[in-house]
Amino acid sequence: MPASPALPISDHDEHDALLRLLTSGAPAAAIRRLLDSHGSADTALRAGARDWASHGLDATTCNAIRTPDLVLLSRGQSWLESASHELIGWSQADYPPLLRRIPSPPPMLFVAGDAGLLWRPTVAIVGSRAATAGGCTNAAMFADALSRNGLCIASGLAAGIDAAAHEATLRADGATVAVLGTGPDIAYPVRNRPLLERIAAQGCVISEHLPGTRPLRQYFPSRNRILAGLSLGTLVIEAAERSGALITARLSAEVGREVFALPGSIHNPMARGCHRLIREGAQLVESPDEVLEVLAPLAIDLAKALRGELEASYAPPQAQLQTPLQPCLPIDPDYNRLWEALGHDPTGMDELGQRSGLTTAELSAMLLSLELEGRVAAEHGRYCRIGP
Amino acid sequence: MPASPALPISDHDEHDALLRLLTSGAPAAAIRRLLDSHGSADTALRAGARDWASHGLDATTCNAIRTPDLVLLSRGQSWLESASHELIGWSQADYPPLLRRIPSPPPMLFVAGDAGLLWRPTVAIVGSRAATAGGCTNAAMFADALSRNGLCIASGLAAGIDAAAHEATLRADGATVAVLGTGPDIAYPVRNRPLLERIAAQGCVISEHLPGTRPLRQYFPSRNRILAGLSLGTLVIEAAERSGALITARLSAEVGREVFALPGSIHNPMARGCHRLIREGAQLVESPDEVLEVLAPLAIDLAKALRGELEASYAPPQAQLQTPLQPCLPIDPDYNRLWEALGHDPTGMDELGQRSGLTTAELSAMLLSLELEGRVAAEHGRYCRIGP
């Protein structure tokens, strides 16, 4: 591709700066280091080539940042023009908190749909593309029950188990996240295009790849790493002995997350992978309750930890409402503001943000915490008080 | 029952002495202590009431030994008149070696059929009486493959999995042992009477109970203990969540034996017990090979240990044959005699015993060892050399 003329760095906003870093071909670790040092991609780009080189970028990459591939850049820019599309960089507060903790997290994520779901306690439900009918029924049964119990269901939009898990979650009006090994606008397999669109509209689709990126074999292990990294645990429904689902499960175990596997008949080749995982230490589960039993306390711990991180990283905003605290609520001005913003009528996240002045990330963690404590009910992405 | 007149102790042979101890109602541990002290039941009975009391027998029991219940005694005596019936006491060298190692081994065993099988490396195959058709097929498949690979298949003669395992082993001309919770002459369920008779004719039936003992609920956990104790491991094919098979498996684990369980569909209630065992640490197995892989080295270790025990407990018999040693055989006069006794025509255990002067227990351990080393072939209970 022909090199394009250097663009004046100062004119680019954060999205553009992130896109220039991504399309330069800079290694993910170097991009994260730059973002860590400078706090934003825009500031990083202003720092100049000497600084970039000190973060490990070679001359070719520095040159590619200066003279970006305009075709790729504009592809990202035009995708990001949609109000429902987002690009979340490593240094941003709303980068998914669990994904932040894996060994090589993606430096940025393209997000279509509700990015707030990336802060919900999530379980990955994965399995074979060539699943049996019984396997798909089991995937749907677990996705339905787990999503109705407040877990977000992540999967990979593949045929078979993945699609069954996404579909059942959408039917249950639950929260589902599709993690793609392609650009966020490319369905693979192609016949899952309508499903992709429904997830983007009702849930959330994410990818580390630039819009328009076609499926390549080497992208899928990395996709599996993100899927595992987003989730408190991975549930494998059916998997052959060599299968991407096993990779996701192992990556999940490697980053200290839970691994669950369904047993099956010894005559079902699609149960072999699950049996292998169970032998390697995965938890054998027969019912959604067993998954919830393990994940619910982890979700509560996570909510507490996130709340702590948020409190540590943000200066406490000035109290805007001076109403008396509910006796059962923690003595905390943010919680107090959220409680005031919440009514007995279900209210969406945007409205809660406007009423309370809290960010989506703050709201997500606090609402989750209140939901798990039984003080807030969530339905169809809207929240209301339980009790007075 | 009316007390019978005292019998002169000196007139009774070992079987009668064992029967008198058993029918006296003496606790199993006290009978074992008496046999340990005196080396035989006959000698123990000659020692008199003061000695019996010093081994923990109370006055009522001492009296019952002196004046045995003749009805019970003659029931045992008449059953033992058959040449294929045996009563093996705790102090006898042919008491099953693995059973000897459990916490409360039975002080004697009634045996119908080939007692030599009790020295063979054994796997217990157990499961639900209300097994599914698929479960019974799996039981038969595992019993067939494991018995063809030299393992003796023990089970409990119950309906369902037990019967399927016994039947398949008989069909494969393999070695099978039925461990009963009734007398050795009582089939439970009654419809398994023909199976009991075929096992007694082709394999081995054992019980700790006097012939004629009817099935009582409280006898079955003890039966399961013997089944687990005889075996290098227990394989559970299908079991409901509360089931005797689970008890056998847990007893097996308690005495340090292997526990294997087949997984199944999460919708099969008969897989629940297996799944529970797997969660508790049982080895999930999909194929007979996986069981063999674990048990074969244990069988070889056992053969070596038994050989060591036999050498330690018997004075070496005078060498009868002075032929040159086969270069591949251990330099050992007993092995040399056995090798000479073995020909290239399959020869039964009795004939080998007559030719070599070795006891059945010695022969069993040595033949097993040679078989596992690939030097001897066994078929239908007859043995021949492999190679020159």
Image (cartoon, coloured by chain):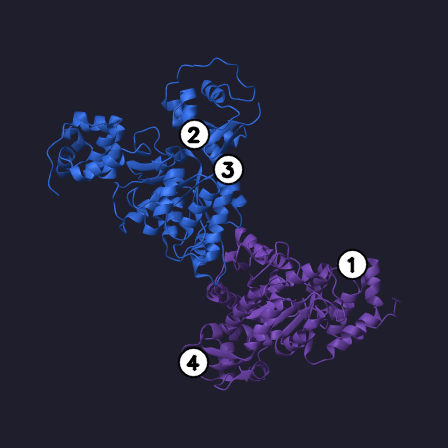
Chain colours: A blue, B purple
To which chain does the residue with label 3 belong?
Answer: A
Residue under disc 2 on the same chain as residue under disc 3: yes
Tell me the mark number nearer the camera, choosing from 2 and 1.
2
- Residue B179: x and y in percent read 65, 67
Q: Distance between the residues labelled 4 and 1?
A: 53 Å
Residue at 49% across, 44% down: A144
Q: Is residue B175 left or right of residue A67?
A: right
Disc 1 marks which residue?
B57
Three-letter residue code for mark 2: Ser
Q: What SS does tag 1 mark? A: loop
Q: Report crowding for label 2: few under 14, some 14 to 19, many 20 or more residues within 10 A (C-alpha).
A: many
Find residue B154 and report its image quarter. Answer: bottom right
Q: Mark 2 points at which residue?
A: A364
Chain at numbered mark 2: A
Q: Is residue A172 above or below residue B180?
A: above
Within 10 Å of disc 4 (Cα), the crowding (few <14, some 14-19, many 20+) is few
In this rendering, the label closer to the viewer, 4 or 2: 2
Closest to the observer, A143 or A345: A345
The quadrant of the rendering that contains the N terminus of chain A is top left
Return the chain for callout 1: B
The residue that mark 3 highlights is A296
Q: From where the camera sits, is residue B315 visible?
A: no
Looking at the image, is mark 2 or mark 3 nearer the viewer? Answer: 2
Dot 1 amino acid type: Leu
Rounded to the nearest angstrom, the CA distance separating label 3 from label 1 is: 58 Å
Q: Residue B335 at x, y = what percent?
A: 50, 77
Q: Mark 3, mark 4: which one is toward the viewer?
A: 3
Q: Helix, strand, or loop for circle 3? A: helix
Quickly name the residue at label 4: B326
